[in-house]
Image (cartoon, rainbow, N blue to C red):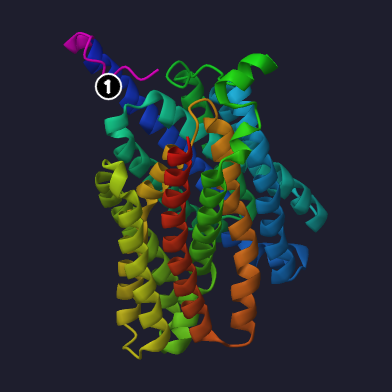
Amino acid sequence: MIIASDPSLSPTAIASARRKETRLIGLVGMAHLTSHFCQLLLPPLFPWLKDAFAVSYAQLGFLMTLFFVVSCAVQMLSGFLVDRFGPRPILFAGMACLALSAFAFAASESYVALAAVSVLAGVGNGVFHPVDYTLLNRLVSAGRLGPAYSVHGVTGSLGWALAPVLLVTLAAAFSWRIALVVAGLMVLCVLCVLFLNRSVLFAPPTLSSSRTESSKMDGGSLGFLAIPAVWMCFAFFLFSAMSLSAVQTFAPEAAGHLHAMPVEWVASCLTIYMACSAAGIVFGGILATQPERCERVIGVGFGLAALVALTLGLVSMPAWGVPVLFGLMGFCAGTGGPARDMIVKRSTPPHATGRVYGVVYSGLDIGQAVAPLFFGALMDHQHYSGVLIGLAVVQGVLIISAFRVKQVRRTAVLAA
């Protein structure tokens, strides 16, 4: 229950409630950082795994497809579990799966074992968005939701940035198995911190075991699926993931080919993009404090990002300009992150948070599983400009999707 903004409380009680909100935001951010870190447990280690298991990069890439397909399915299911049992036990179960998967990856002796553990890791990854957004939306005051979404987005970006640096450093200094063991220990440490602060993470279940009561609350446990805005949000997140996947996988390399960029600069493009994206998320959190302008924030942010992508794909430039434009694109795209989360919240029935976020955010997993196939085919045929133009097109579709969410939500209000 949100109480930090309750005017009937004493100043002391309000200050205490705000401190508890701050702790909650920090803990959720820590969990989100861990989940993003674990999404990249294997990719930075592909050069070592390729030699250790005598497999191709295509086979290693399939491990990530398997991971995200499982995560997608679990994300939909975990939303129901969060509403039925509350977010805290689901969070602890997901963290335990991630820790166990890191240790199991380290102990794997065959490609089949890696594939099996990828399934377990996907199970762990699938719980976080329904858990995180249920905790934030139910326990954080409305006026602080924008900054809370910013923290959530920034910590996720930091998790992506930390994984390659840490894992590659440890693998080079010791071995890939040691790197994964250390990763598992880190996840266990975070789980311990969350457990010690478990009182802050408590939110009661909202999905009643009584079918009658559930029906009164939100039209039944599946009633939210009839809301058009939910599916428009799903489509928005699908294209959002495709955009991010293109940047994380092939866009820097494509730009490197087009602009004769040194090989060592290619990896820096992604690092700069993620760092500037984190800065954009912070700025976007300030803008998202006014929910009515969220669609405009997304339109401007992704519109500018699409223009940058087109510039990279169609305009000749010196090599030094490429990382600069990737940073600008990351900042512009990042500003839309908190607004993106806000439009989902505005489309969510009050008693179906976990279920809606489970379905909507499964679009992220599907997009990350599908995009490498499309953009990888362009790379294989040396259509480097096509990769960046395709990225711009996907970002343009994001803008249309955001305004379609607003349109169908407004239509539903008028119909009611």
Instruction: Locate residue 288 relative to residue 10 in the image: left or right.
Output: right
Residue at 19%, 8% in the rendered image: 10
Query: Which region shows up in magenta?
Result: 1-12
Please tell me whether residue 6 belongs to the stretch shown in magenta: yes
In the image, taking residue 300 as reference, residue 205 lies left or right, namely: right
The answer to whether residue 339 shows anywhere in this view is yes
The local crowd at label 1, few if under 14, some if 14 to 19, many if 20 or more residues have their Cα within 10 Å, is: some
Residue occupying the point 52% across, 31% down:
353
- Nearest the viewer among 280 and 9 is 9
Image coordinates for residue 328, horizontal then vertical, percent: 30, 68
To which quarter of the image does residue 264 belong?
bottom left
The vertical placement of 359 against 377, above or below, is: above
Q: Can residue 128 be seen by looking at this rendering?
A: no
Percent x, y of residue 52 = 73, 63
Type of secondary structure dominating the magenta stretch: loop
Residue occupied by mark 1: 18
Helix, strand or loop for disc 1: helix
Amino acid under disc 1: Arg
136 over 388 or under it: above or below? above
Picture coordinates of residue 416, whole percent (x, y): 47, 34
Q: Which residue is drawn at 48% across and 66% down?
A: 397
Q: Is residue 17 above or below residue 130?
A: above
Of 97 and 181, which appears nearest the observer? 97
Q: Check the picture and name the quadrant holding the N terminus.
A: top left
**Lateral position of residue 13 relative to residue 402, left or right:** left
